[in-house]
Structure formats: structure tokens, C-alpha cells
Amino acid sequence: MPKRETFWDRRAGHYDNGSSKRGPAYARKMDRMRALLGPADLVLEFGCATGELSLDVAPFVRHVHGIDLSAGMIQRAQA
């Protein structure tokens, strides 16, 4: 049986277009996370979507593993 495309799979191609990543709230969130995380930490992000947050955190920790139910979102994250 072929896999059904999900709501999030259909949105994966343009999901990052609506990102609030460029705003001051995102910068504050990243500052708070960097203060809590260190180079020996392992991070697991549930609902990682296209991996924007995981990719931004990755330089500051040992390893990040992102999980999402949408195959389309994971494909975008891997790209």
C-alpha cells in the first residue's frame, strides 16, 4: 500500500518561508538554549520539521537527533 501524503508532507516545501527565525523572539530563544547547552550535550528534538532549530543548535552541542512524523519534513531537513 503506498504511503499517504500527510498534511505536513504537503507543507514541507514551503514550511520555512513562514519561519519566525529572523525575529528577536527567536534570537532570545537561541540565547537561552545556548546558555543551557554545552559541547558534551546530546539533543533530541521531537517534531523537528525541517530541522531549522536543530541545525542552529548543532554547533553548540555534541550531537542533535531530530524526529518528525512527516517524511517530507525529514527529507527537507536532510537536504
Image (tube, rainbow, N blue to C red):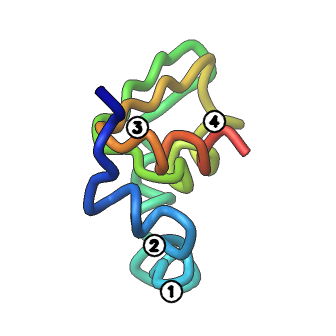
Q: Earlier in the sequence, mark 4 or mark 1?
A: 1
What secondary structure is marked by label 2? helix
Residue at which label 3 appears: 36
- Describe the element under mark 1 as helix, strand or loop: loop
Q: Which mark is drawn over residue 72?
A: none
Q: What label does residue 23 carry, if any?
A: 1
Q: Earlier in the sequence, mark 3 or mark 2?
A: 2
The amino acid at mark 3 is Leu
The residue shown at (49%, 24%) is 65
Residue occupying image coordinates x 47% and y 71%? 15
Residue 22, position as x, y percentages in the image: 58, 82
Number of marks drawn = 4
* Label whose residue precedes the other's in the sequence (4 or 3): 3
In this rendering, the label closer to the viewer, 3 or 2: 2
Which of the 4 image quarters holds residue 38?
A: top right
* Quadrant of the snapshot with the C terminus: top right
Marks 4 and 2 in Cβ contact (< 8 Å): no
The residue pinned by badge 2 equals 26
Instruction: Give the labeled residue for mark 4.
Output: 58
Three-letter amino acid code of the residue under disc 2: Tyr
Q: Is the residue under label 2 in contact with that under label 1 (CB below 8 Å)? A: yes
